[in-house]
Image (cartoon, rainbow, N blue to C red):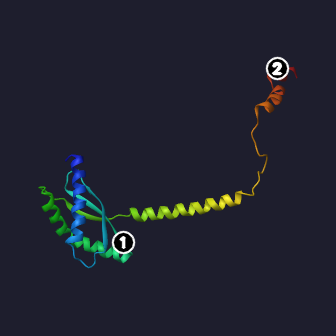
Amino acid sequence: MADPARARKLAVRIRQIVSAAIESQIKDPRLGMVTVTDARVTSDLREATVYYTVYGDETVVADSARALASATGVLRSTVGRQTGIKFVPTLTFVADMVPDTARELDEALERVRHADAELARLRENASYAGEADPYRHPDEDDDEDADTSPEHRSAS
């Protein structure tokens, strides 16, 4: 097992190398606007997962995934040359869903803001169903407690 700090450093370096190599070396026409967002390396430094996003619709995303899968060997050899480590980790490319999730959360928050605004609008002319203050206050409780005190109950 390698040092976790070494695995993190290697992951950062792999992300940089793969990102630069995609821009300069990979000339596949299927490759869309790919952005490498993260890389993670296992603790034994044998496998690396590279997360990426693609700008475009589903067909562009699928085409880019196929292009990255076919370029894995070239990218792995580039990582090996530039890192100089003895065992070059295998590369696995995974489409990063964080931007999609963030967009869905933004849309959900916007729906909630509209619902809150509608509720505030409906609440403007609303009145209480009962009294405005449904709680008892100590000065009112003193009169009622006098009738229910233990001395009063035993006398009756």
What residue is shown at x 22% (from left), y 57% (from top)?
13
* Relative to 141, 117 lies left or right: left
From this view, report whether residue 114 is shown above or below residue 2.
below
Location of residue 100 with respect to 56 vertically, above or below: above
**Amino acid at circle 1:** Tyr
Circle 1 SS class: strand
54, 155: nearer the viewer? 54
Q: Is residue 10 left or right of residue 97?
A: left
Task: Give coordinates of residue 127: x percent, y percent.
Answer: 77, 53
Residue on which disc 2 sits:
151
Q: Position of residue 124 (x, y in %)?
A: 72, 57
Q: In the drawing, what numbered circle is on residue 137? A: none
Residue placed under numbered mark 1 in the picture: 55
Q: Is residue 56 left or right of residue 9?
A: right
Q: Position of residue 136 (x, y in %)?
A: 76, 36
When the figure is inspected, residue 128 is found, relative to residue 105, above or below; the finding is: above
Q: Earlier in the sequence, mark 2 or mark 1?
A: 1
